[in-house]
């Protein structure tokens, strides 16, 4: 059936393509309209980063021979101070094309469909996704949410759960502002101190015997996710899983923390 609206939208899109031809969201190279928003080279790079063996409870990157029962040594021995969860699904390293996609998503409120599909794919190969009762995005402080106009973890969760026919539950609140950017220059302990007691559970929610999965974009030291998990467990959650797009690796984390410390010392 003839549709004026569809024809008009199609024509506007064609004009838009001439004025702003489609480009890869990562490298800016011109792409075909159907190319799924990235060029072939950037998709290849993401695919390489997505593969790789990770500990199934803390997400640390390890070679397949250094994992026993899919766990790293620190998780197996329950090492003190080592952040771990009942299960963790992580798409890849916070680096290269994946990092560019995540930054683009957080700045411009786009790409949630691509990132959501990457996370959904990783979840479908995890051992815990089918056991999850509640999918909970890690919240940002309300003022930051208002200023940005959206909450990245909520958008990401919606896109990742679409194919499962599930919806995220905004169960957690951040009761005070936690300086996100500056925390990139803090040690693990300092981050834990900064976030301690910052989450609350939405009133009237009973979590007893529920399995909860936290969803967030990037895991750095894991202090924020560990505190969110502690809050959920204190409210009775039987298991807390984590699904993230990317993890920074220990080396880059430590060097950033040391960089922050040495800068503070110099001042
Ligand atoms: Zn590209
Ligand atoms: Zn581990």
Image (spheres, rainbow, N blue to C red):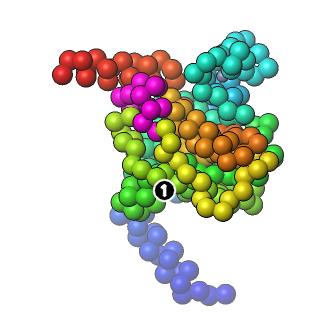
Q: Is residue 162 visible?
A: no
The count of marks equals 1
- Residue ID at (65%, 57%): 168
Question: Residue 36 at what x, y percent from top left?
Answer: 57, 52
Check the image and report above or below for 184 versus 110.
Answer: above
Question: Residue 24 at what x, y percent from top left?
Answer: 46, 47
175 or 211: nearer the viewer: 175
How dense is the environment of label 1, judged by Cα within 10 Å: few (below 14), some, or many (20 and up)? Answer: many
Most extreme residue toward the left is: 267
Check the image and report above or below for 158 versus 119.
Answer: below
Q: Quadrant of the C terminus?
A: top left
Check the image and report above or below for 144 versus 97.
Answer: below
- Residue ID at (79%, 20%): 69
24 or 246: nearer the viewer: 246
Taking the image in four quarters, ligand 2 sits in the one at top right
Question: Residue 253 at what x, y percent from top left?
Answer: 45, 23
- The verdict on residue 194 being magenta is yes
User: What is the magenta range?
Assistant: 184-195
Q: In screen coordinates, is 207 left or right of 99?
A: right
Residue under pointer 1: 151
Question: Residue 17 at what x, y percent from top left?
Answer: 43, 63
Name the chief secondary structure element in magenta: helix
Q: In screen coordinates, is 36 left or right of 24?
A: right
- The verdict on residue 103 being magenta is no
- Residue ID at (57%, 21%): 81
- Residue ID at (72%, 52%): 207
Helix, strand, or loop for circle 1? Answer: loop
Q: In screen coordinates, is 102 left or right of 78?
A: left
């Amino acid at each position: 059936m003839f549709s004026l609206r569809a024809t008009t939208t199609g024509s506007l899109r064609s004009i838009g393509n001439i004025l702003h031809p489609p480009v890869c969201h990562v490298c800016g190279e011109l792409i075909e309209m159907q190319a799924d928003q990235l060029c072939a080279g950037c998709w290849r790079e993401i695919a390489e980063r997505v593969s790789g063996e990770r500990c199934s409870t803390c997400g640390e990157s390890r070679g397949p021979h250094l994992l026993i029962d899919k766990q790293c040594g620190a998780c197996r021995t329950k090492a003190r101070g080592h952040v771990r969860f009942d299960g963790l699904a992580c798409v890849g390293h916070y680096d290269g094309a994946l990092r560019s996609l995540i930054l683009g998503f957080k700045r411009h409120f786009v790409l949630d469909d691509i990132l959501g599909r990457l996370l959904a794919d990783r979840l479908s190969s995890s051992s815990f996704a089918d056991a999850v009762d509640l999918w909970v995005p890690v919240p940002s402080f309300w003022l930051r949410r208002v200023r940005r106009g959206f909450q990245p973890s909520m958008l990401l969760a919606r896109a990742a759960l679409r194919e499962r026919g599930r919806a995220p539950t905004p169960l957690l609140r951040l009761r005070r502002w936690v300086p996100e950017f500056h925390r990139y220059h803090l040690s693990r302990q300092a981050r834990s101190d900064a976030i301690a007691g910052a989450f609350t559970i939405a009133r009237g929610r009973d979590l007893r015997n529920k399995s909860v999965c936290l969803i967030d974009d990037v895991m750095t030291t894991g202090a924020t996710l560990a505190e969110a998990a502690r809050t959920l467990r204190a409210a009775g959650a039987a298991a807390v899983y984590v699904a993230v797009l990317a993890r920074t690796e220990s080396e880059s984390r430590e060097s950033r923390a040391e960089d922050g410390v040495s800068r503070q010392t110099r001042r």
